[in-house]
Amino acid sequence: MSQSTAEKAATTEHLSRPGPEAGAANLADGLPASYAGLREHFAPVFASIAAGALERDLERRLPREEVRTLDRAGFGTLRVPAAHGGPGVSIEDFTRLLIDLAEADSNIAHLYRSHYGFVESLRFLPGRLQDAWYPRVLAGATVGNASTEKGGNALGTLNTVLTRSGEGWVLNGRKFYATGSIFSDYTRVSASLDGEDGRRFAVVATDAPGVTLEDDWDGFGQKLTGTGTALFEDVTVPEDAVLDRTAGSAEAVHEAAFFQLVLLAVLAGIARAARRDTVATIATRKRTFNTGLGLPFREDPLIQEATGRISAQAFTAEATVLHAARALDAGIQAAIDAGANVPEFTGTLPGALYESEIAVEHAQVTVPELALGAAQDLFLTVGASATSTSKGLDRHWRNAQTVATHNPIAFRARALGDYHINGILPEGLNAIGDAKTAGPAA
């Protein structure tokens, strides 16, 4: 259904806070930069989120209040650099915290992907745009995403168009999978330019005239991410809200890897949630089967072994994701040291930046299988009672499977094979559209 005016007011109430003006509130003030400090700061919020996750899934109730609480606690500011007034949290520590949040509720961790992709891209944009947007983020503003079109656009093209109008622009188009936008103050929209070469991003307020957001995502998992259709009809876009994107630039390479890293962190959190619920279910189970040893499940060595395998899957998924996160930290630092974070940079991108993309590619092949395995093997440790809808144990598998489909694993594995055999660098996911029609056979 469409997001009503009242719903928009409820989800974007922090737009009334001071924005980039002098004296604006900085929600990052006092936030620690270390994972240990952040874990302590957000622990009560995450615990509350986890307590209501099952009920929200069963009722298909969007986590509006939970997201507002996280926003007020400064969760959206973590990757703002210290030089711009933010905590300057490393990618590794941010990823650790995101895994904790995904264990509490994978939907909520997932919906922040769009916001943090935008925040990452700001590091590579001109200073005037950083000065315009970092203060908004620090004041509590969040940014959703509206990039993918459902069909009718050829691969590499977009039907959503930005047209010049006076000193600004006008945006028209329709998007699908606008993840997080319903909860956000702005959404970042990919668009082609009318009469000009190239592609841009337009960042528009979600309550601007001409913007309609639909909660019509009908997937069987990740149902509460606010994913759905976004419609833009003659939306006015000011100059400081139109962002360039150059294919092959440091920004494009880094954000493509970062965008996938967030999904991998969500999968690692789901694996941990499967482990948590496995242990909790076994600990309280009294019934057993005559075909077993007659022991309580918590003492049965076969059940213990199955639980141990689930634990190992969760451990390995998390370790793999954190290894990739460290590679991204190294890659972005190398880019900064080389000056590649400056829009005018024309040199060769550092190898560490590409290595971070390769690390994420490897994780994309293995982590989904680990998370899906943990979510599925949970059912080996109980009985038919575990399939009760009221227990919601199936949501871990549904959510993991939904996240795993975002970037086809077969394509990632092929790209890695090509890299190791032929030295061809993998290309990050940056376009979805209709395939070209094959020509006649030779």
Image (cartoon, helix red, strand yellow):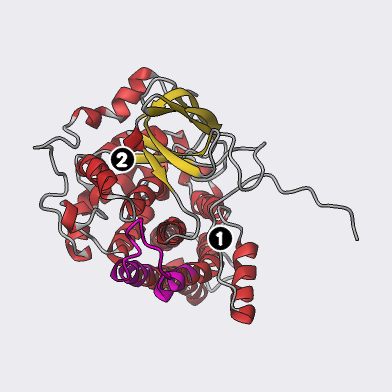
Residue 258, quarter of the rendered image: bottom left
Numbered mark located on residue 376 in the image: 1
In the rendered view, does 176 fall on the left or right side of 82?
right
On screen, residue 172 above or below 304: above
Vertical placement of 5 versus 276: above or below?
above
* Residue 243 x %, y %: 39, 43
Which span of residues is magenta-colored?
328-357
Could you tell me how many numbered marks the image carries? 2
Is residue 99 shown to the viewer in this render? yes
127 with respect to 405 (left or right): left
Q: Is residue 73 left or right of residue 352?
A: left
Which of discs 2 and 1 lies nearer the camera? The answer is: 2
Question: What residue is pinned by disc 2?
Answer: 142
Residue 286 seen in this snapshot? no
User: Residue 335 is drawn in which quadrant?
Assistant: bottom left
Label whose residue precedes the other's in the sequence (2 or 1): 2
**Residue lying at 38% horizontally and 44% vertically, measured from the top left:** 53
Can you give x and y, in whole percent of width and height, for residue 323 in the image? 39, 73
Name the image quarter holding residue 52.
top left
The kind of residue on which mark 2 rests is Thr
Circle 1: element type: helix
- Residue name at image x 19 percent, y 64 percent: 34
Which element carries disc 2, helix, strand or loop? loop
- Three-letter amino acid code of the residue under disc 1: Gln
Q: Residues within 10 Å of mark 2 (few under 14, many from 20)?
A: many
Task: Indicate yes or no whether the magenta region holds residue 1.
Answer: no
Please give the name of the residue rendered at 47% of the width and 46% of the height, measured from the top-left corner: 391
Q: CA distance from mark 2 to mark 1?
A: 34 Å
Screen quadrant of the C terminus: bottom right
